Image (cartoon, helix red, strand yellow):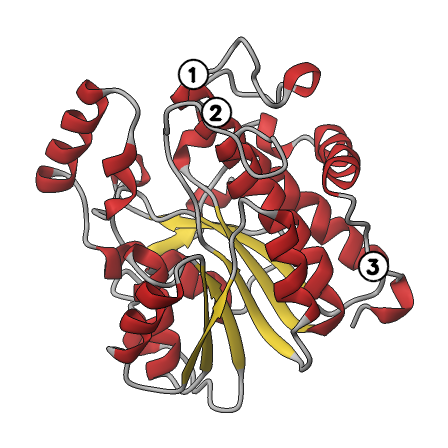
Amino acid sequence: MADTTEARTPRKWNATHLPDLAGRTAVVTGANSGIGLATAEALARAGAHVVFAVRDLARGGAAAARVAGSTEVRRLDLADLDSVREFAAAWDRPLDLLINNAGVMMLPEQRTRQGFEMQFGTNHLGHFALTNLLLPQVTDRVVTVSSGAHRVGGKRIHFENVNLRGAYGPTRAYAQSKLANLLFTLELQRRLAEAGSAVRALAAHPGWAATNLQSHAAHPIARLFMQAGNRFLAQDDKAGALPTLYAATQDLPGAAYVGPDGPAEMRGAPTLVGRSAAASDPVAARRLWTLSEELTGVQWPLTATVR
């Protein structure tokens, strides 16, 4: 059987190929900048009503005001599970697309409001809770943004010390959170299929996209390296958003992973890409799901309520 990396989409696929999304609603976390904003802009331009789910309402409002199309702004702090619950409790209508885009990258060691390691807590646990709380309203698909960095930094979930207390490294923590995004997608799709739901869970990664995400790296040398990479290697945020947009709108199988088709998946047109063995482990995916339920207090919705 051919590896999924051999499957190729049309090389010139871009946001102009999006279908008509009139009448559809999308939530994009972290939509105030970077690939989140580029994703929101493209969805709105295609006719979707786009909800900017952002921590800073002022910045989110300013970003939404520059977007042509139907938008609204709602507060969501993924590093605070109380904020996640408030956002979900206020949601009262069908939701076609949930785009789990927001994230933090290679920060100095920090904790979320509930005491979790910041990258794992924000990138994974916040989105885990949000997805499960909104899932009874989701009608089409959930797309979670991961990273090629899931292949580095230990290449596993540190179940014995998931908050990396006494063992923190910015790259290790980021890689663990991005691996968690892929395992979450894998187990979410398995549960959706088992429930007979038509909703699909997919993942995407942007390659190397020049955004402000890299500017928060803990080590100054890492920041300099990323600044140089942004200038000479990266594609822009609009190109970086293409894998997310492709995963959100094209007819792809559940648990598919989309990234750029160029060398080392750094840039290029969106295509189906492979993932590490660790990111394909169904046992680890189920174990992570159980742990995430315990840590967040958010459970899988009743089967009868899932579309």
Task: Tell me where residue 300 appears, x and y as whole percent.
Answer: 81, 53
For residue 24, side relative to residue 281 (left or right): left
- The earlier-in-sequence mark between 3 and 1 is 1
Nearest to the observer: residue 44 or residue 111:
111
Label 2–label 3 contact, CB within 8 A = no
The answer to whether residue 169 is left or right of residue 233 is: right
Q: CA distance from mark 3 to mark 1?
A: 34 Å
Residue of label 3? 301
CB contact under 8 Å: marks 2 and 1: yes
Residue 238 is situated, as x and y percent measured from the top left of the image, at 25, 61
Disc 1: which residue: 169
Identify the residue shown where x is 32% and y is 40%: 265
* Element type where label 1 sits in the image: loop
Instruction: Tell me residue 4's x, y (percent).
Output: 50, 45
Judging by the rendered image, the residue that carries numbered circle 2 is: 173
In the rendered image, the quadrant that contains the C terminus is: bottom right
- Residue plotted at (54% across, 50% down): 78
Dot 3 amino acid type: Pro
Q: Secondary structure at mark 3?
A: loop
Count residues near mark 2 (Cα–Cα under 10 Å), then give few for <14, some for 14-19, many for 20+: many
Q: Amino acid type of disc 2?
A: Ala
Q: Amino acid at mark 1?
A: Gly
- Percent of width and height locating residue 46: 37, 83
Q: CA distance from mark 2 to mark 1?
A: 6 Å
Query: How far apart in space, not on screen, are marks 2 and 3 (Cα)?
Result: 29 Å
Q: Secondary structure at mark 2?
A: helix
Toward which corner of the image does residue 296 lie, by quadrant? top right
